[in-house]
Image: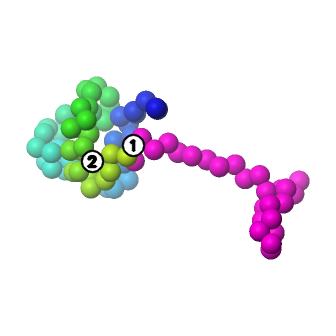
Amino acid sequence: MERFDPAQLKAVRQRQRVSAAEIAQRMSVSTAQVTRWENGQRRLTVDTLIAYCNALGTSVSQFFVPNIWVPVVGVLDSDSQVLPLPP
């Protein structure tokens, strides 16, 4: 399993255009506490991570699904056969 990167918390929050203060208010914690979690200065419990995700309206799973890149090794012809990439 990949190691959890707390910076992902901030990245997801910012993508959703939600401030740390808004998350703090939704979770009934201080803004400083949210910042500490996002900077990795404080560890998250599972319950806290779930509450953070609920406050964002997102799923916990998005923090643990790796980015998967699939290499392009060919192109499909009209018969859906894979042909090598042209040089």
- Give the image location of residue 53, x and y in percent: 27, 48
Helix, strand or loop at mark 2: helix
Residues at circles 1 and 2 in contact by the CB criterion of under 8 Å: yes
Specify the segment rendered in magenta: 62-87
Viewer-proximal residue among 80 and 10? 80
Give how far apart the Cα atoms at labels 1 and 2 are: 10 Å
As drawn, the label of residue 53 is 2
Helix, strand or loop at mark 1: helix
Residue plotted at (25% across, 35% down):
46
- Give the image location of residue 13, x and y in percent: 32, 49
Residue plotted at (18% across, 39% down):
31
Residue type at numbered disc 2: Cys
The extreme bottom residue here reads 78
- Magenta part mainly helix, strand or loop? loop
Residue type at numbered disc 1: Phe
**Crowd class of label 1 (few under 14; some 14 to 19; many from 20; radius 10 Å):** some
The image shows residue 73, relative to residue 79, as above or below, that is above
Residue plotted at (85% across, 56% down):
84
Find disc 1 in the rendering and name its residue. 63
Question: With 77 as the anchor, is 39 left or right in this view?
Answer: left
Instruction: Tell me which corner region of the image, top left, top right, bottom left or bottom right, holds residue 82.
Output: bottom right
The image shows residue 16, relative to residue 49, as above or below, that is below
The mark tally for this picture is 2
Residue plotted at (65% across, 49% down):
70
- Give the image location of residue 6, x and y in percent: 35, 34
Badge 1 or badge 2: first in the primary sequence: 2
